[in-house]
Image (cartoon, helix red, strand yellow):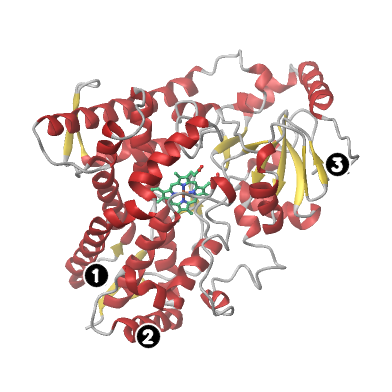
């Protein structure tokens, strides 16, 4: 089956959907009319959003066959304007492709668009919205967001975890120095090293220590660290874009889709079993009197009590969030620098003039505008989250002067916003210089890559600190070039826009 993930939800197109759709036209027509009646109230007589023409029953699903809906959405914006509506099967969806409209949705109209409608896969994997990032904007959200900010991601917590980030930068540098003598014979796969270091950091911040293996009682097996990575990070990322055609035809939810359900349920069960084992092991360490000061200790002692499911989800969330998007950004940045020797040289010159013979530290970042520009331009050109996890319009509202009825799903296409020609000159080009023009510090939300408003990314500062120090150190200590520069290699894969082909680089120590 072809799959087109839309944000964290999934858009499916394929055989089963077509086959089943044929037999239910009347049912769908009825439901469509009912949506119009229930959500269609438009007291101010605002115009309706222009629609991208689709076909009966399937709407625009056929055109979303391409697996990168963010690109299809951006292409449609050229014809239909920055805001338009589509039909994903029977579900009405509005797509936004401009910075101004995204800000309106994130901030001005937030009260009407503050919930989410999750795909079947995400309902299971998020334990029905038991996460900060996937919950509705409700009391639970406020509690778990307060927890994560207090103990992990807010300013005081970031200070507390500083030593862990420094150790990570040091380990990264040591590993690259160990590999450098063999490069260029063996190109370096930065992703492998960086991802592993981020996973270690996530474990230390969340559970107090890294693991080599763990006995998972509920499954009756011992898992290696790589297997744990697979279960906690890789499987859920792939599961989140799994397709259940019933997402587009909710009236057919009664039809079983057993193979899909079994697959996602199994991912959930394995992840839960591993998280349980990790918590049990930690509780033993508490019992033995070890002095511990990680997120789990905060959740078990100072925070408002959570149910077991909430505790496991609260601990898993930062593990997956730390392990992926920061790596995606850093790999793209190093790929672009390796392809652009002049820009790499400019960054190196800046590092030399600010740091001399000292290593880059977080304190020095504010003196390095070019490094900051490299980070932000990478977020713009290769936004790790290309479409914001779908929002749900729960009461009639408006966007861009158009009427948006309750019951509409909203896709904010960050990729489209960052490709807006009126705002970004030659948006296809990776050009950090564009961020230097203003001559003032860059606002973390300038590119929309971290979202905006009340649901803005809670880990943006952590991501920025880790990515900038890492990029800086890697350029300070090595000269980077691609092993084989076969022209642009910007294809992506997965829920976040991970590079399809890992970057393979030849690195040469600077002195
Ligand atoms: C370059 C790296 C990152 C990018 C591009 C990114 C992007 C995003 C985006 C687009 C959202 C969704 C906003 C929305 O729904 O409107 C988000 C939410 C969130 N992110 Fe990140 N993120 C990054 C790194 C991180 C890290 C490292 C963490 C934590 C360790 C993290 C934790 C969160 C949390 C908790 C939320 C939910 C906030 C809320 O709903 O209130 N993120 N992020």
| Residue for point 56% across, 30% down | 119
Image spot of residue 63 (x, y percent): 70, 42
The answer to which of marks 2 and 1 sits earlier in the sequence is 1
31 with respect to 178 (left or right): right
On the image, which quarter does residue 504 sit in? bottom left
Which residue is disc 2 drawn over? 349
Distance of label 2 from label 1 (alpha carbons): 28 Å
Whether residues under marks 3 and 1 lie with C-beta atoms below 8 angstroms apart, the answer is no
**Would you place residue 164 above or below residue 441 in this image?**
above
Which residue is disc 1 drawn over? 185
Image spot of residue 2 (x, y percent): 58, 37
**Would you place residue 408 above or below residue 428 in this image?**
above
Image spot of residue 455 (x, y percent): 55, 45
Distance of label 3 from label 1 (alpha carbons): 60 Å
Q: Can I make out residue 249 in this image? A: yes
53 with respect to 210 (left or right): right
| Residue for point 17% across, 31% down | 281
SS state under label 1: loop
The answer to which of marks 2 and 3 sits earlier in the sequence is 3
| Residue for point 58% across, 63% down | 446
Q: Is mark 2 within 8 Å of ligand 1?
A: no
Image spot of residue 458 (x, y percent): 45, 49
Whether residues under marks 2 and 1 lie with C-beta atoms below 8 angstroms apart, the answer is no
Which residue is disc 3 drawn over? 48
């Amino acid at each position: 089956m072809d799959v087109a993930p839309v944000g964290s939800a999934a858009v499916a197109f394929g055989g089963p959907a077509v086959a089943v759709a044929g037999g239910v036209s009347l049912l769908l027509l009825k439901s469509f009319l009912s949506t119009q009646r229930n959500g269609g109230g438009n007291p101010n007589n605002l115009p309706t959003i222009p629609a991208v023409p689709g076909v009966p029953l399937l709407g625009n699903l056929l055109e979303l066959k391409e697996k990168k809906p963010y690109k299809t959405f951006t292409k449609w914006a050229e014809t239909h304007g920055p805001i338009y509506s589509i039909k994903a099967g029977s579900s009405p969806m509005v797509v936004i492709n401009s910075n101004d409209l995204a800000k309106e949705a994130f901030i001005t109209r937030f009260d009407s668009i503050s919930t989410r409608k999750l795909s079947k896969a995400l309902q299971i994997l998020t334990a029905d919205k038991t996460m900060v990032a996937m919950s509705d904007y409700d009391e639970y959200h406020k509690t778990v967001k307060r927890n994560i900010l207090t103990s992990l991601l807010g300013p005081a917590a970031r200070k507390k975890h500083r030593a862990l980030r420094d150790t990570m930068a040091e380990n990264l540098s040591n590993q690259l120095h160990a590999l450098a003598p063999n490069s260029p014979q063996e190109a370096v796969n930065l992703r492998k090293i960086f991802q592993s270091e981020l996973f270690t950091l996530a474990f230390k911040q969340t559970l107090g220590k890294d693991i080599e293996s763990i006995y998972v009682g509920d499954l009756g097996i011992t898992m290696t660290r790589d297997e744990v990575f697979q279960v906690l990070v890789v499987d859920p990322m792939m599961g989140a874009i799994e397709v259940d055609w019933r997402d587009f035809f909710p009236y057919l939810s009664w039809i079983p889709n057993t193979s899909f359900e079994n697959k996602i349920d199994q991912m959930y069960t394995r992840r839960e079993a591993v998280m349980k084992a990790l918590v049990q092991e930690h509780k033993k360490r508490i019992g033995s009197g070890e002095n511990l000061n990680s997120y789990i200790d905060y959740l078990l002692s100072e925070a408002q009590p959570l149910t077991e499911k909430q505790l496991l989800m609260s601990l898993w969330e930062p593990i997956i969030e730390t392990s992926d998007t920061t790596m995606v950004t850093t790999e793209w940045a190093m790929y672009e620098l390796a392809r652009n020797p002049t820009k790499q040289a400019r960054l190196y010159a800046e590092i030399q003039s600010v740091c001399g013979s000292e290593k880059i530290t977080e304190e020095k970042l504010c003196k390095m505008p070019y490094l900051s520009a490299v980070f932000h331009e990478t977020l713009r050109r290769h936004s790790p989250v290309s479409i914001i996890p779908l929002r749900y319009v729960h009461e009639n509202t408006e966007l861009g002067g158009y009427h948006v009825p309750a019951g509409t799903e909203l896709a904010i296409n960050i990729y489209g916003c960052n490709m807006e020609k009126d705002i970004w000159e030659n948006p296809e080009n990776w050009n950090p210089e564009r961020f230097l023009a203003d001559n003032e510090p860059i606002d973390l939300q300038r590119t929309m890559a971290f979202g905006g408003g009340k649901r803005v990314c809670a880990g943006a500062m952590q991501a920025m600190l880790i990515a900038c120090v890492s990029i800086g150190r890697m350029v300070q200590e090595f000269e980077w070039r691609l092993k084989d520069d076969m022209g642009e290699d910007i294809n992506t894969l997965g829920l976040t826009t991970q590079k399809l082909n890992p970057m393979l680089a030849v690195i040469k120590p600077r002195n």
